[in-house]
Image (cartoon, rainbow, N blue to C red):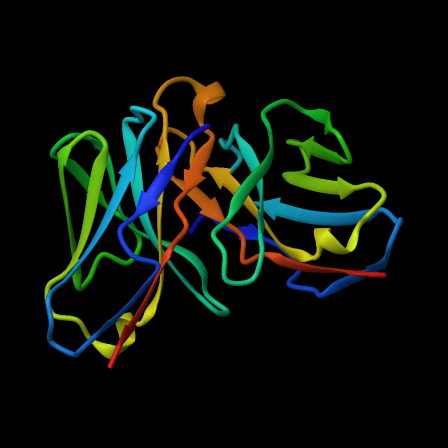
Amino acid sequence: QKEVEQNSGPLSVPEGAIASLNCTYSDRGSQSFFWYRQYSGKSPELIMFIYSNGDKEDGRFTAQLNKASQYVSLLIRDSQPSDSATYLCAVNVASSYKLIFGSGTRLLVRP
Amino acid sequence: DVKVTQSSRYLVKRTGEKVFLECVQDMDHENMFWYRQDPGLGLRLIYFSYDVKMKEKGDIPEGYSVSREKKERFSLILESASTNQTSMYLCASREDGDRGSFEQYFGPGTRLTVT
């Protein structure tokens, strides 16, 4: 069974701090990795994707991928209360159309 | 911008009713998906379709069927709704191609309650 693991949280950080969200996956053949943000009662919104080892930056968000360790993370710099949401990690199943989703980490940014 | 729409935001149905949930995407994507999301269980794939009239079972297909007669439209059918099908249903679409095209976009969701 291919799995994607995330700490459910909540992860609580003060406004302006860096929030670090982590995800591990079991399928060594996975090549595509995604971070979604989901506000309560809303659908997931794609915020970052990464395909290569290393870092990818987009504004306040940085995705980090380490395929050898089967680990992907999302850093949110200068966290804002509006960043408070559940963050879902998703990993493609090798040679498949499917994505496997983690159960999500709930982030709380305290004003 | 990719746009995925779903026919209803909220739906209340009675046990035993036949229920249709419809999803439309406007980006000419080959792949479309139906998920359900439940507290503590995360997102679970029900069915997906990689082309018109083509479908594959996901992880939890029991009690559901799907239809894809046109590329832009993917329907989820609950043949005889049961209370354990009360959930948030999410449709998604994604372009085919190499790994650079794997971004998957979700519709707004349909919260279905079966009484």
* Viewer-nearest residue: A15 or B59: A15
Task: Choose between A102 and A76: the one closer to the eye.
Answer: A76
Q: Quadrant of residue A47?
A: top right
Residue at x 43%, y 37% (from the top left corner): B105
Residue B62, by quadrant, is bottom left
Question: What is the count of numbered marks?
Answer: 0
Q: Residue furthest bottom?
A: B115
Residue at image location 21% in from the left, 41% down from the top? B74
Is residue B87 placed above or below A45 in the rendered structure?
below
Q: Position of residue A46 (x, y in %)?
A: 54, 39
Please state the horizontal and vertical placement of residue A30, each as a whole percent of the image: 50, 32
Using residue A29 as the reference point, say whether residue A71 is left or right of it.
right
The quadrant in which the C terminus of chain B is found is bottom left
Residue at 23% across, 32% down: B72
| Residue A92 relative to residue B84: left or right | right
A29 is higher (above) or lower (below) than B39: above
Residue A84 is situated, as x and y percent measured from the top left of the image, at 70, 57
Q: Position of residue B58 (x, y in %)?
A: 28, 49
User: Quick check: B42 above or below A63?
Assistant: below
In this rendering, would A31 be left or right of A10?
A: left
Image side of residue B77 versus residue B2, left or right: left
Instruction: Using the rendered view, name the quadrant where residue A54 is placed.
Output: top right
